[in-house]
Amino acid sequence: MTIPSTHQIAPSFRDEIDRVRTMFFSRDPACWPVFGDPVFASILGFRKARAPERGRVQQYPDGKILEAQLRREDRVPQGMRDPKDGPDPLLLFAAALSKNWEDPASVENVVTSPCDPALFGSMAGILANANLVHPEYSEAAADLESMVIRQMASLAGYDPAVAAGIFTQGGTFCNLYGYLLGIRKSLPQSHDLGLEYGQDYRIINSMAGHYSNMTNLSLLGVNIRRKTIRVRATDNNDIDLACLEQQLTACFQLDCVVPTIMLTMGTTDTFGVDRVRPVYDLRNRLCEQFEITVKPHIHVDSAIGWPLIFFLDYDFDANPLGINEATLPGLQRNAERFSELKFADSFTIDFQKWGYVPYTSSLVMIKNGADLKALEHDEEYFSYFETELEGQTHLHSTIECSRGAAGLFGASAALQYLGVKGFQCLIANTLQNANYFRFRLSQVPGVKLMVAQNQGPSVGFRMYDPNVVSDPEAEFDFERHRHDDPGYRERVDRNSRFHREVFLRRGKIGLYTNWVKFIAHTDYDSLGRCGALPGEKAVFMNPRTRFEDIDQFISSIRAIAAPTPSLPQ
């Protein structure tokens, strides 16, 4: 098939991404001697073979025996194992047969294969065994954390001399910090007396946000049913600004405190990107109008989308990387949105996602480091630390008592080796793949693309039986307009069953996609409720995925979902 010029990859770009793959994703012991270790080499060798998922156990030496032992064993060995006897076979088996994110077909979710320097850096961090809880236990590792925080502050538009940050265990913890910062600033008595003491409050987030937006509130002891306002999402799955203004105004009119407004820049399934500047302006205007002294804390869950800050200074007119025409406008639009990240009070970074760093490596960035004072506990609790060093650390303000440094070392290595240009190349490559996938899907009968205008790495779609549905756009429009007619529900369920059956029958060919129960939502009813429409998604973060893998996938779904030829009369 001839690829349209708008989707073609420029030769110069192809050379650059191939160079990035060779230097940073090859697991080549000539570049990274650690991969020359015989044990690592055996694990990587098996994974590179790309054995079919159902046949991997059989292809592994003594695989069935090891699998049975792994599932049956319930006793720690009595004796010691001599290292000269070789590695533990169960350990090797579990590593070799863990999910293979190095496989070019692996595009199920916002997870990807870590780069070689990040693996090397994480190993160095594990070897050092630093605990970032306190300088006594981390020494130079604490300086490394401060350096990475300053670097990320500069990229995002924060003042690196004022900003702060905390490496923590996953994006959920980052978002937990975002909520907690707002709560402690707005409701300082909650520190000792709990959330239900004193003034009434409401937490605000978007219906399109990650599920941790709600599970964190439960963890914090928030009365979710009575104290949470979930703002509607637009058709693009970003926050409805008019609805937000209505809800925030109502809160202030009733003298109700709003500790935190949680936004999302890069939703998991459809890459909806909330605007920050309008929310910042709205908050400031209403706080002035209602004489609110402590403003709601704006936290942005940018766990997925944060790497777009590498493009904030990119020359889109000159386009030095040669990014193709199908991708450049959408990338520029998203970069413009991410330029507003500097108006957030804090935001989430997951290096472990689009940052190509091993689990777990997450960083919560805080615009004003003085905000951490609101989280401080009584210093008498920390009697076993050197008091003269406590002013140089976030010891009194962190949720964790222990903060491992492997994620920090991995993130630092990825940043230092890849640099801005390397990340730009990786991000652009994945977005070009996503747009090519959208183009190829648009050629398949019965396919409706979800919010293609969002132009992120996530591509959602819904498939209809072409023998029954002649116009997928019209059918999706019908499904969006929710009503109580029994025929409506039956029709939606029929369409969902067809796609689900195609998904299960196809298996994993070319690309490993994922089934999503909420790929789109219906219109809202009078009570603010909406229904879920399921579908399928692929997330193009894998640097090894190529157009050829996409073509193979498209061929498989065309063969399964092709319309049945009409019989002659």
Image: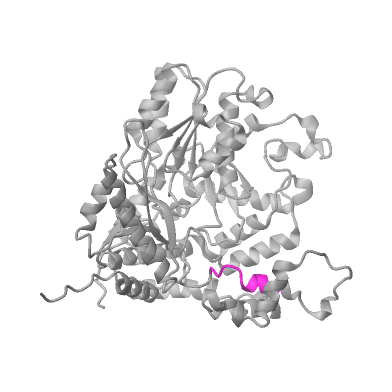
Q: Is residue 100 magenta?
A: yes
Residue appearing at x 71%, y 31% in the figure? 377
Residue appearing at x 61%, y 25% in the figure? 195
Which residue is more in the foreground, 500 or 2?
Answer: 500
Q: Residue furthest left?
A: 569
Rendered image quadrant of residue 427:
bottom left
Tell me where residue 395 appears, x and y as whole percent: 72, 39
Region of the chain picked out in magenta, as a range: 92-101
Which residue is more in the foreground, 504 or 422?
Answer: 504
Which residue is more in the foreground, 376 or 557?
Answer: 557
Residue appearing at x 48%, y 71% in the figure? 20
Q: Is residue 162 shown to the viewer in this render?
A: no
Tell me where residue 363 appears, x and y as whole percent: 58, 48
Q: Is residue 86 above or below residue 487?
A: below
Label count reads 0
Image quarter in which the C terminus is found: bottom left
Which residue is more in the foreground, 423 or 464?
Answer: 464
Q: Residue furthest right?
A: 79
Asked whether, in this view, residue 71 is left or right of residue 153, the answer is right
Asked whether, in this view, residue 394 is left or right of residue 448, the answer is right
Tell me where residue 80 appears, x and y as whole percent: 88, 71
Image quarter in which the N terminus is found: bottom left
Q: Is residue 151 shown to the viewer in this render?
A: yes
Q: Is residue 493 above or below residue 87?
A: above
Tell me where residue 465 appears, x and y as whole percent: 27, 63
Asked whether, in this view, residue 203 is left or right of residue 495, the answer is right
Rendered image quadrant of residue 196:
top right
Rendered image quadrant of residue 57:
bottom right
Q: Is residue 149 magenta?
A: no
